[in-house]
Amino acid sequence: MGNKVSTLEENLAKFVGIKHAIACSSGTDALILALMAIDIQPGDEIITTPFTFIATAETIAFLGAKPVFVYIDAKTFNIAPSLIEEKITSKTKAIMPVSLFGQISDMDKINEIAKVHDLKVIEDAAQSFGAEYKGKKSCSLSNLACTSFFPAKPLGCYGDGGAVFTNDDDLANKLRIILNHGQTKRYVHSHIGINGRLDSIQAGILNVKLKYYTEEIIKREQIAQKYNNELKNITTPYIFPNSLSVWAQYCILVEDRDAVLSKCSNNNIPTGVYYPIPLHLQEVFEYLGYKEGDFPITEKISKNIMALPMSAFLTEEEQNYIIEVVNE
């Protein structure tokens, strides 16, 4: 809660082009804070995607609400806006699209649906801070947005960190109260809250790294385009028109994933799989009643997807080697 944190909040808000950035202890806590700020209660329903890290749906369930999953787009892997409306019920309170792998969801269509049904939109931008959609930055496109500064993210600190973004003055004030044990002044509490404060040392690190972040985004884009141009016989990422990804991951689809993963491992190339078990098939969400086959696109992608090394500091020599091995 020191000067480094308030400076970071000013810098983040300016970078995104929004009134309020509220720094907090992690991307997961950012989602919890956003849901608490709009008074999500047990039994409420939040529409989201089954193809993401568990924190998205976990935070909904943590507050006793129900995650309601919607089909994803087969090309972007983000939630399919055209299929959201059929899942809206009288219990639906918000839509939580995920800007997966660094690319923003189709927010115009999602916001239109939300407006018709008087719903809040919370962008889970844990992987997309700095990305752009139709000239606007991630975290500036909805009622609330949440990001993560976990070390592996495009803009990462040296531990856990996150932020919530909003243009709503009342929500911003409420978020600041909730993240500090619901405290309005010392030992005076108006809300049930959490300990969601960001450490000043992490804020200091992010203030420095943010100065160089735009340059790193450009480098990540160049590396992604080289992959796109030189990888053969595999499905490379699709980027929505008028959009800029920050390439939190560079994910490809391959038919024989185990063979490609083994080939990479044998040649000392690190890889990752995002996400091998979709959320609707996770044991913890059995109570929701989903079964295998309910989301066939998600399930197929989860069997074929893999991530190649992506960093602003990946050298041309390293990338040439990765491309050569994968193409083999």
Image: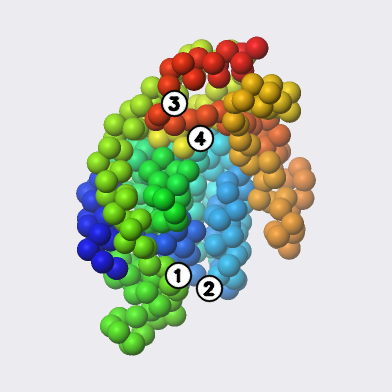
Q: Mark 4 or mark 2, which has the lower sequence index?
A: 2
Whole-percent x and y of residue 326? Answer: 61, 18
Q: Crowding near pointer 4: few (<14 within 10 Å), some, many (20+)? A: many
Q: Crowding near pointer 2: few (<14 within 10 Å), some, many (20+)? A: some
The kind of residue on which mark 4 rests is: Gln
Q: Mark 4 or mark 3, which has the lower sequence index?
A: 4
Q: Is residue 210 above or below residue 246?
A: below
In the figure, residue 116 lies in which quadrant?
bottom left
Q: Crowding near pointer 1: few (<14 within 10 Å), some, many (20+)? A: many
Identify the residue at image location x=72%, y=50%: 281
Q: Residue furthest right?
A: 292
Which dot, 3 or 1, sits closer to the camera? Answer: 3
Spatial CA distance of label 1 from label 2 is 8 Å
Tag of residue 322: none
Q: Is residue 281 above or below residue 299?
A: below
Which dot, 2 or 3, sits closer to the camera? Answer: 3
The kind of residue on which mark 3 rests is: Leu
Tag of residue 314: 3
Tag of residue 41: 2
Tag of residue 249: 4
**Residue identified by numbered label 1:** 36
Secondary structure beneath disc 4? loop
